[in-house]
Image (spheres, coloured by chain):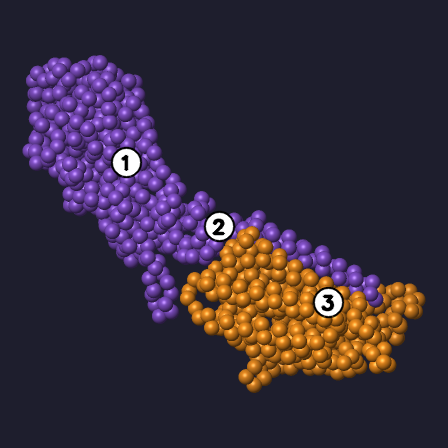
Amino acid sequence: MKRNILRTAHLFFVLFPAIGVYLAYWQVFASEDLMNHPRNRRVLLNEKRVLRGTIFDRNAEPLARSEFELSGQGGTRRQVRKLMAPAAMSHVTGYLSDRYGRTGIESKLNSHLSGMTRLRSWDDLRDFLMADQRRGHDVFLTIDAHVQEAAYSALEGRRGAVVALVPSTGEILALTSSPGYDVARVDTAWETIQEDPEEPLFNRATSGLYPPGSTFKVVTAGDALEEGIAEPKTSFRCNGHVNIEGYDVRCPDGKAHGRVDLTQALVVSCNVVHAQLAVQIGKSRYTSYARRWGLGEDLFGDLPSKASSIVRSDSNLTTTVLAQTGFGQGEVSVTPLQMAVIAATIANGGLRMQPYIIDRVCSYGGERLQQTTPKGEQQVISPDTAGLLAGMMEAVVSRGSTRGTFSSLSFSVAGKTGTAQNPHGKAHAWFIGFAPVESPQVAVACVIENAGAGSKEAAPVVRDVMAAALAHL
Amino acid sequence: MKTNAFQERRLLLISFVWVWGAFAIAYWNRYYPGSWEPAVRAAVTHFAIFFSLSFLLGYTCRQRDHLLLPLLATLTGIGLTMIYDVKPAFLSRQCQWLVVGAAGLWLVTGVRDVSSLSRFKYTWMFLGATLLLATSLLGKRLGASGEITLALQLGPVSFQPSEFARLFLIIFLAGFLGEKSRLMGFREPTWWRIGRQDLRYLGPLLIMWGISLLFLVQQRDLGAALLFFGIFIGMLYMAETRIVYLTIGIALFMGGAYACYRAFGHVQTRIDIWLNPWQDVENKGYQIVQSLFALGGGGLLGTGLGCGYSARIPAVHTDLIFSAIAEELGLAGSIAVLALFLILVVRGFHAALAARNELTSLMAAGLAFSLGLQVCIIIGGATKMIPLTGITLPFISYGGSSLTANFILMGLILAISSEGSGEDPEKVERR
């Protein structure tokens, strides 16, 4: 009898370890798959327990920050996201919704903000051991809330976008798309927001593709200077129109500018001169320069964005299209961010910097977990060429149609207007520029859809943005 | 043997410190603020019960295995902590049951000679069968369509007779098989031949077996049915009866299991869920999938006491409390609990091997086997090793009947361990 009892006892030395193997399988080897199973709410619930990190602007002003609030009769704690400027910041911070997901920085840096990252700080470890309230990591953006709000209010709800950069680093001071939407109302007013014909959810600043119009002439002029085809003083003749391979390039209203040098051609925004310059540079050189300016590549890693291009992907650059590209029409389509990068590159001595919006990620105790360093992408044109081009753009502002617009500012501004013809109605109003000319601290691009003349509509917006960015001067 | 009692109290102290710490952490970590009073009350009750048991057992079974009580205290403590964690409302009730269980344990150890219980083996058989019959006839209707009858209502308390019927069954089997096993081994003309004596012998066994299983299947208490089946086979084997009985037993088990599978839709459903719970995650497979999610959520070291999400699992405080432990204490904790159970079972078998006569030996072995099998069935179910059935995890799950019955079970093992290792009572009397 005892023999069989002993044998039966041994059975448990097999059964229990077998269960142990099953446990090890589910708890360790299959753990990740189980956690990622769509029906498993643990990851989501974990996120809600961790106090979500704060999104700060460059001056450590909180743009979005979470608080616990007691709600309901049971006194259950619920996290509430407090937003500084729900509409103006809507395309930067993005929204955060259980039902509709998340966008913007809330999405891009979700793992940090929610504290669900593997990269754990000492603060996380201490909280884990001490069982303190865990907090997500804080994100510091390059955005300046004042500049952002100045841009948003200057757009006055019109469809458009403003991007402001620090030329020497590529830091984004403002990334505004208008109209915005109230981030806090996404859950309650989703239908209204989504079906709004003005498309408030669409980030025009990074993903809106527009013909750049005359603002693109700075690219053509810069390429021509760099190639040695022309100098600012080189003289041209404008008859109001020119025939290029059977296509008639015309200046607005067929007005002849007469004998102009290159600077004056930019000041009066002469299509004929720039079309001829583009053709003279040639298809392959012009395309290669465009690539150097950043067209054809996704400039921006921090938020979803579109690449600009000088030619539609399904067609080849013909000479007539090239001539139109020379003055910003044809098939060229650009994002406001791309135009801001072009302005910033000229301001930065021809060195194109990678634009960025995430400056650093810190644990709430201040431990730095991630830091972006400015990165020079490409020397597009030589510093000398950039200096000459900057001088020409300064002349555009001091002598051209926007003379009055910027006269109130205490610093000098270089810029270029654009009034881009498009098949959707009135022309898009453009302005790109930077200031102060001597030591540029801000480069701005602005587009307003179907608003008309750039000098009248877009330039005042840029002025307000520059004034806000350089308020300390 | 003062040192042994001293060692026991020292181990108990370690267990108390562990339980107090666990309560403190569980309270501290609670995401939703809750009251600390039930935790303190439970910790104090736990301490008082086991500390006084350690003294009181000195009167009834001095020579007991001194490892058993600390093991019991630790497992019970883990149970209380987890109930505080997942269903705090049930904590004070469980503490009351703990008092009842401890009293039952002590009373059982007071039985002078455990083998004397076997004298009334047919009484136990009758009691067990009656309990199961009463449950089938008068049981409370549970479950979605009221087809499950597990509990009997007695005044203000409802209790689960199958927990106690199991004990009666083991005592009956030990008495029946322990007495006659020697007789059986002798004449074996051909191993498979069955004569008249065999039928006389097998008769009561088969009747008892048939009755209990019929009722359990009718009550849809599949976990208990599996447990009863296992106890029958296990005890037949351990009693070293004729191999043909064992063969008949296993054949009947196979046949019965297949018949149940074909005849009852709910048995088929259980098997289908077990084979692929992912097909119907939100309905039929919900419970097992939630259990697996909890296991996965625990990982290696767990979320920490009070930080899990297992409170959402249906029946987490009874059937699936192990999943909650695995989530909050991780693989480290779940393996540790498994190891505690293994040690407890092994000590039970140790008592069986050391027991002085065959009756108590077989009884202790049956009790230890039943304990081990129950742990395997429910944890095996929670880990999808076998189909999930609704039985409790001894000492840990919430439930008065389970707690009381298992405490009585431990009382019997304690008493047998004391008899086996102690001096011969006859010698004591002669002195």
- For label 1, the residue is A171
Question: Residue A20: x and y, percent?
Answer: 64, 55
The three-letter amino acid code for the residue at tag 1 is Glu
Of the residues shown, which amino acid type is indicated by label 3? Gly
Q: Position of residue A328 (x, y in %)?
A: 20, 27
Residue drawn 51% across and 68% down? B84
Q: Is A227 situated above or below A304?
A: above
Query: Which image quarter: residue B214?
Result: bottom right
Within 10 Å of the Cα at label 2, are there few (<14), some (14-19), or many (20+) other Cα atoms?
some
Graded by Cα atoms within 10 Å as few (under 14), some (14 to 19) or many (20 or more), the crowding at tag 3 reads many
Q: Nearer the viewer, residue B334 or B17?
A: B17
- What residue is pinned by disc 3? B348
State the mark number for residue A36. Answer: 2
Q: Which mark is residue B351?
A: none
Please state the chain letter of the residue tagged with numbered disc 1 in the rendered image: A
- Which chain does tag 2 point to? A
Q: Nearer the viewer, mark 2 or mark 1?
A: 1
Q: Which of the 4 image quadrants contains residue B366?
A: bottom right
* Image vertical order of residue B167 relative to residue A202, above or below: below
Q: Which chain is orange?
A: B
Q: Position of residue B18 (x, y in %)?
A: 57, 64
Q: Residue furthest front?
A: B2
Contact? badges 2 and 3 (CB < 8 Å): no
Residue drawn at x 27%, y 42% is A58
Q: Is residue A214 above or below residue A56?
A: above
CA gap between label 2 and label 1 equals: 36 Å
